[in-house]
Each structure stands twice: as C-alpha cells, then as structure tokens.
Image: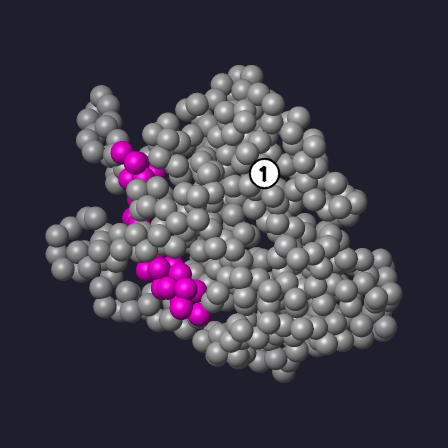
Amino acid sequence: MGVVDMALDVESIRSQFPILQRTLPNGKKLVYFDNAATSQKPLAVIDAMSDFYKNYHANAHRANHTLADESTAALEGARDRISKFFGTSESQMIYTGSATEAMNLVAYGWARYNLSEGDVVVTTEMEHHANIVPWQELSKERGIELRYVPVDTEKFTLDYDAMEIAVEGASLVCVGHVSNVLGVRNDIERVIRMARSQGARIAIDSAQGAPHEKIKFDDLGADFLSVAAHKMAGPTGIGCLLVSEEALSEMGPFLTGGSIVKRVSLEDTLFQEGYAMFETGTPRMAEAIGWRVAVDWLEENVDFEEAHRHVQSIASWMASRMREIPGITVFGFPEREEAIGVVSFLHDTIQAQDLGYLLDAGGFAVRTGHHCAQPLMEAMGVGSTNRASVWIYNTMEEAEAFVSHLEAIVSRFG
C-alpha cells in the first residue's frame, strides 16, 4: 500500500462533505474520482448559501433597504476575502461566471482593445478549449497571428524550446497552469519570464491549478489569472479573473448593461472604472457568499503542501498499479512529484465510454471523453480517455478499491 502523509486530517475533512456519505441506487458506496471536473462542497458552504436565501436575499447595489445593504456588504466582503486568499487586492478581482468566462474576458475585454492584424497570440496544444477557441475567434475577427506550442508526447510536457521561439514578438502569451488531462503542472514561472522578455502580456488559466496550489497573484507576475470556484470546494456559477493594475487600465467593456455604467443617454454611455466595468447584471450574490466560506474553510482545514503530498501519493500509487493491468495505458506521468492528482487512461479493447459505465457500476465516478481538450487528444493519438482525479478528501482505501475493480473489469471484459 502507498504511503500517504497523514498530517492532513482526511477523515475530519470527509465528514464535512455530506455527498461523500452517499450510497448509489445500485447499493454501491460512492467513490468520487471526478474532482478535475468539479469538487464536492462542504456543509459550511451549502449552509451559508441557504442562509442567504432564507434570511437576507435581495439584489446587491440596487436599493437602500436593510436586505439590500446586507446583501451588498456580503458580496463585497466576499470579494475582499477571496482576493486576499489569492494574494492580491479587491480592486484587481473581477467576478465572472466561470474560469471559461474569465478567459473570454481576457480575449474580449483586453485583446479586442489592444491587438490588431499581425499581432501575435501564443497558446499551446495542451489547453482546455477555453484557452483556444476565444483566440481562434479573435484571429478571424482581427487577423491576429495565432501560434501553438506543441506538447512533447514522450515527456508529456510542453516543449519549452519551441515556446522560446514561439514567444518572439508576441503580444500575449496564454498557458494553462495545470493540464486537466495529464495533471502536469506547467512551469508557469518560466513561461512568465519568457513572455516578459518580449514585453508580452501573460494570461494563466488556473482552473486546475488553484485547487492544488496556494496562489499569490501579485508575486507571480502574470497579467491575468482565471479561477473557477467550483473546483475548489466552492459553488458552481462563479469564478474570477485576477488582473494586474496595468493590464486592467488597458481594458474595455466585454458585456454591457445597467450596472457597469455611470451614465447613459441616448447619445452615449459613460462606464464605471476598474472591476465594476465588467460585472453587468444581477450579481452572483449567493455564489460569492458560498465561495467566501469555501476559502475560509480551505484555510482552516487544508495546508496546501500537505494536501499536494496526499493527493500526489494516491494518484502516483494508482498510476503505477494501473500500468500493471493488461491492456491499460496511462497517459503522462502522475508519479512525478509535481503532478497534481490526475490519472488519464485507456484500455486497448474496452471503449472508454463502456469502461466508464463499468466503473460507475462499482460506485466509482470518473470522467470519460475528450475533456474539452481535443487538440491534446489528437497529439496523443486518441479520441478520448477515462480520467480519475483525486482531491483532498480521497483516500488510499478508495484507490485500492478502484484498482481492484478495474482489474476485475479487465479480467472479465478485456
């Protein structure tokens, strides 16, 4: 059995997640290995959002009555708390609906106002579609040059030599913090240095990185960083874009409407400044409240370095055992010390979707498909994978049961 650093109180953590106690309709106990898609929520987050709806639900920034004041205070208090959690100030945090929306905000709120035909945007073939499709659309609209850094499919890392060449003359470099398919943690510090050497802005998609690593945005030196609350114990429907002060001063409106304006006439509109320029419509009040409680919960219950050792140890053990199962291919190297809890795999004769159903029959929730990363799938020569992803509340016992069930499936159907 693998060795897990038990400084992380996993049993105490698990007890705070009601869904982890669930028994599925087939009588199997749930084992949740789909954390790269979305994490589960502790009771504290669920209760905080319920309390808002029960006791002080009203539209923030819209009225002067007691409920509106309480809602506004909670929304802006959450911004202050969450931004500090990520090592920056509230003036540099824009609420978004997701990390995907945050990357679109970079494309449409910064790039549309600063790039024109011939300017260069660099991204990679490892990216989630959220960090590819907006740049393709911008290329069609503005005629920018789009360069893709390839993946070294032997090392299962970015080709950093190719990136050194790709960033030459670039205006914007966009890279994922962690691959949602391979679990590889990209050397974003090195990428930031490369981008800075060319005077380029740098955008980091940290949807997969933020749940596993304590981010200090101001120290990192990036211009933009996207985060999704739902992957780190927070609610769905909210994320944020962290923006450097210099980059924020260069941005213009993305979506438009009532709350981002100072004054509207039939001839023209005067917009708010800073983050207020980008938060149109009714705010995500319950979601912000839930996210604030989630970051409080993380700080009270989780040391990120201990959590990484715990997660990496489980995923490493799983990958090494799965490589011994006939017909199973594990993609990448979850055994690496810096890898972050993702094991993507395939069987050579059992189709990925069928294997997903067979694993679910044993109570194991895994992801099956192309994981919104089709260019990476093409580079690896496959159409899809099964993906087991580990987080703080998973245990070695769950990993052992998973491998045992996978062995039984392969023995019977392989």
Q: Can residue 27 be spotted in the picture?
A: yes
Q: Position of residue 339 (x, y in %)?
A: 65, 55
Q: Nearer the viewer, residue 367 or 91?
A: 91
Which of the two residues, 112 or 400, is positioned nearer the viewer here?
Answer: 400
State whether the magenta stretch is mostly helix, strand or loop. Answer: helix
Q: Residues within 10 Å of mark 1 (few under 14, many from 20)?
A: few
Taking the view exactly as shown, the residue that stands out farthest to the top is: 118
Q: Is residue 369 left or right of residue 117?
A: right
Circle 1 residue: 190
Based on the displayed image, in which of its 4 quarters is residue 65 positioned? bottom left
Q: Nearer the viewer, residue 14 or 304?
A: 304
Can you tell which quarter of the image residue 242 is in?
top left
Horizontal side of 154 relative to 167 (left or right) equals right
Display coloring: one colour
Q: Which residues are magenta?
A: 273-301
Instruction: Residue 146 in the image: state x and y as whole percent.
Output: 60, 26
Residue 248 against residue 3 in the figure, above or below: above
Q: Residue furthest bottom?
A: 27
The residue at 70%/37% (across/down) is 159
Q: How many marks?
A: 1
x and y, in percent, of residue 190 in the image: 58, 38
- At horizontal 38% and vertical 71% (from top left) the residue drawn is 44
Kindly tell me whether residue 135 is visible in this rendering.
no
* Side of 163 relative to 112 (left or right): right
Check residue 294 for magenta coloring: yes
Q: Residue at x 72, y 67 (%)?
A: 318
Q: Residue at x 44, y 43 (%)?
A: 219
Q: Is residue 87 left or right of residue 394?
A: left
Residue type, numbered disc 1? Arg
Magenta stretch containing residue 312, yes or no?
no
- The answer to whether residue 234 is above or below residue 215 is below
